[in-house]
Amino acid sequence: MFTLFFYVSTRGSRRVGLRIQVLASGSKGNSIWICSEKTQILVDAGLSGVEITKRLKESGGNPKKLEAILVSHEHRDHVSSVGVLSRRYDLPVLVNQGTLDSLPPKIAPLSQVLLFKTGSTFEFGDLCIHPFSIPHDASDPVGFIISENNSSVGICTDLGMATKLVVNYLKSCKALILESNHDPDLLINGPYPWELKKRIRSKHGHLSNIDAVKLTELVYHRNLKHLILAHLSETNNHPEIVGTLFNRAREQNEWENLNIEVSEQKCPCNPVIV
Ligand SMILES: [Zn+2]
Ligand SMILES: [Zn+2]
C-alpha cells in the first residue's frame, strides 16, 4: 500500500506527499491515520485499542510504526483508547493543557505527554502541525492543519459553527476532513431528548449537512482535491443523504476535480494521497 504513496516527478526528483486514511468516524469513535515519508501518527483514538489496531493492520499499517497520537479534544469518542495505545506502543500523546486536564481519568496513565499550544504551529517528525481553536463544548477543542512540503490536510470535526478563523485556515489545504453531522429535519423529528437536540444544534455542538456545504463553498479552491465528510450521526443522518447533497453542490458550484468521500463508523475510508 505504501508504494502508492511515493511518486517520481517529471523533473526526476522524488516528491513525497501525505497519506491520509480515516479509520473510523462518528459518535461511537473517531481515528485518522496520517503518514508522511518519515512520520506516522493517529489523530484521535476513540475506538477500542483492539479495533483501531485491527483496522490499521487491515489498511496495510503497523501499529509499531506509529510515533504519536494527536488529540483534538477530550470527548470519549476521540480519546477512549489514547491511554491503552500510548502505553502499548510507547507513544507520546500530543495534546493541549486544557484537553489534558479534562481527559477521562480512566484513560491514564499516558506513556508520555507532549504539550502543544492552541494557535502555535509545531513540528513533529517531518510533519508541520497547526492546531486552531474551534467552537465545540469541550475545554480547548482544536482543528488541525497538518502539512509536509506542499501537501496539507485540514481536519475539522466536532464543530458548532464555521468561524472566520476556521474558514481562513481551511482555505489553503489540498485535502479536507470536515464534519457533516446531521440532517436538521431528522434531528428535530428524531428520538433524541430536546436538551440533546439543542446541544447538537448550538454554536458549540455539531455542524449540519447544509452548514458543511456552506463551509465547503467558502473554502473551495482549484487545488482542493479531496473532501472527506466525517462524524455523521447514525441516528440523524445517512451517508446517502450526505452523498446526494454534496454531489449536487459539486455540480452547482463546479467543484472540478474534487473527489468527495463519505466516511463511516463501521469501516475505514479509502486512503487519500495528497
Ligand atoms: Zn466527536
Ligand atoms: Zn466532541
Image: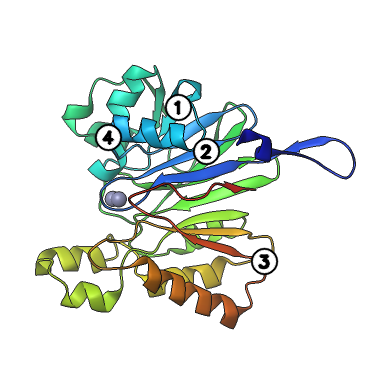
* Alpha carbon distance from label 4 to label 3: 36 Å
CB under 8 Å between callouts 2 and 1?
Answer: no
User: Secondary structure beneath disc 4?
Assistant: loop
User: Secondary structure beneath disc 2?
Assistant: strand
Nearest to the observer: residue 238 or residue 181: 238
The numbered mark, 4 or 1, whose residue comes first in the sequence reads 4
User: Which circle marks residue 101 in the picture?
Assistant: none
* Alpha carbon distance from label 3 to label 2: 22 Å
The numbered mark, 3 or 1, whose residue comes first in the sequence reads 1
Q: Which residue is mark 2?
A: 34
Left or right: 4 as drawn, with respect to 84? right
User: Secondary structure beneath disc 1?
Assistant: strand
* Alpha carbon distance from label 2 to label 1: 10 Å
User: Secondary structure beneath disc 3?
Assistant: loop
* Alpha carbon distance from label 4 to label 1: 17 Å
Q: Which residue is mark 1?
A: 68
Q: Which residue is mark 4?
A: 48
- Estimate the x, y position of residue 149 in percent, counting from the top left: 70, 39
Pointer 2 residue Cβ closer than 8 Å to ligand 1: no
Left or right: 227 as drawn, with respect to 9? left
Q: Which residue is mark 3?
A: 257
Nearest to the observer: residue 84 or residue 268: 268
Q: Quadrant of residue 207?
A: bottom left
* Residue at left offset 32%, top offset 18%: 87
- Viewer-nearest of labels 2 and 1? 2
- Viewer-nearest of labels 2 and 4? 4
